[in-house]
Image (cartoon, helix red, strand yellow):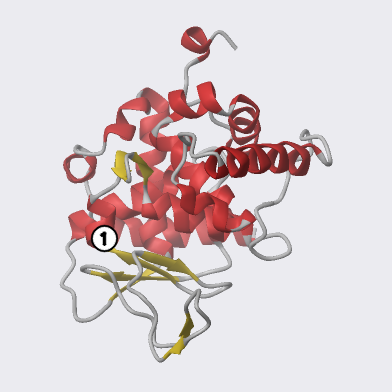
């Protein structure tokens, strides 16, 4: 009963916002990933995007004047990973803070040489445990197949992957597993992939991901998620077992079965 009431109230908020399908299509037209979603999937993604906007609070960072079109694009990128999981996977947080460009967190930062600075470097995104998601609009605009050192980048997918990861035991690279996923397989396959890429980097071999992925297991999962949605063909070819597990987790096949031969 509570869920039905929530859906009804949410539907009223969506109607009051007044977004149209045409507005949504215009807002996401320049994101190539959206071409993958057609027919009923596209309709479901649009509806989820509107409901995401009804549930979340958008706040300006640094007095940035964002528009409805910006919110629609950001929300769509946020909803793509959970399209077949459900919007409830984002229930533990409420607020999106949107800056125009990189932002500098108001906290101390220790560099690799051990020196502690009053402020850290500029960031394109950040996800707080049960707190807000903070994003740079410029970095959202820079999403794409080869925009981070020639590798896939999508700051929204990255930070929302952290939010999914945090649902079980904090950000450790292991989000909640579905009942049909084999216990222990995630850890085994991701660890093997991590070790192989670490070895490749040490021997100066080309990596299929931005090497920021190798800073921690949490970042590895987040960067792999970016590649899974932005460059799935590359990921499937270079990291087939990681790709397979991400298909199971996200309940999506970004490389169509008829093409992949899986």
**Badge 1: residue crowd in 10 Å (few <14, some 14–19, many ≥20):** few
Judge whether 38 appears above or below 258 on screen: below
In this picture, is 64 found above or below 189?
Answer: below
Position of residue 50 measured from the top left corner of the image (x, y, whole percent): 35, 52
Regarding mark 1 in the picture, which secondary structure is present there? helix
Q: Is 240 in front, or is 176?
A: 240
Q: Position of residue 2 (x, y in %)?
A: 62, 62
Which residue is depicted at the point 63% across and 54% down?
217
Can residue 15 be seen in the rendering of this structure? yes
Which of the 4 quarters of the picture holds residue 252? top right
Q: Residue furthest front?
A: 203
Furthest residue in direction right, as rendered: 183
Q: Is residue 4 visible?
A: no
Circle count: 1
Say left or right for 252 vs 99.
right
At 18% from the left edge and 74% from the top edge, which residue is drawn? 64
Q: Nearer the viewer, residue 94 or 143?
A: 143
Q: Position of residue 166 (x, y in %)?
A: 63, 62
Location of the N terminus (image quadrant) = bottom right
Q: Nearer the viewer, residue 104 or 86?
A: 104
Q: Is 3 on the left-hand or right-hand side of 49? A: right
Residue shown at 43%/47% (left/top)?
79
Please state the horizontal and vertical placement of residue 112, each as a whole percent of the image: 50, 74
Is residue 85 placed above or below 18 in the rendered structure? above
Question: Residue at the location (47% across, 77% down)?
Answer: 111
Q: Which residue is mark 1?
A: 17
Q: Quadrant of the C terminus?
A: top right
Horizontal relation, residue 227 to residue 151: left or right: right
Q: Indicate left or right for 243 with 152 as reference.
A: right
Quadrant of residue 105 within the rendered picture = bottom left
């Amino acid at each position: 009963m509570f869920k039905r009431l929530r859906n009804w109230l949410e539907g009223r908020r969506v109607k009051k916002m007044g977004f149209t399908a045409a507005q949504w299509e215009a807002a996401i037209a320049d994101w190539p990933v959206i071409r993958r979603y057609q027919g009923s999937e596209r309709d479901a993604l649009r509806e989820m995007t509107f409901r995401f906007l009804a549930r979340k609070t958008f706040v300006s960072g640094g007095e940035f004047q964002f528009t409805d079109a910006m919110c629609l694009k950001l929300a769509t990128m946020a909803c793509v990973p959970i399209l077949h999981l459900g919007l409830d996977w984002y229930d533990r947080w409420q607020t999106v803070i949107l800056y125009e460009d990189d932002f500098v967190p108001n906290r101390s930062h220790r560099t690799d040489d051990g020196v502690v600075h009053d402020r850290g470097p500029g960031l394109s995104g950040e996800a707080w445990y049960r707190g807000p998601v903070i994003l740079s609009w410029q970095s959202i605009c820079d999403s794409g197949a080869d925009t981070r050192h020639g590798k896939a980048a999508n700051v929204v997918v990255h930070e929302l992957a952290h939010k999914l990861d945090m649902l079980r035991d904090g950000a450790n690279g292991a989000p909640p597993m579905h009942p049909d996923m084999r216990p222990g397989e995630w850890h085994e396959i991701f660890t093997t992939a991590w070790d192989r890429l670490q070895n490749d980097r040490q021997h100066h071999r080309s990596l299929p991901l931005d090497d920021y992925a190798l800073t921690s297991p949490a970042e590895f999962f987040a960067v792999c998620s970016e590649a899974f949605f932005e460059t799935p063909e590359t990921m499937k070819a270079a990291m087939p077992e990681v790709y397979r597990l991400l298909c199971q987790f996200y309940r999506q096949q970004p490389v169509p079965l008829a093409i992949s031969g899986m």
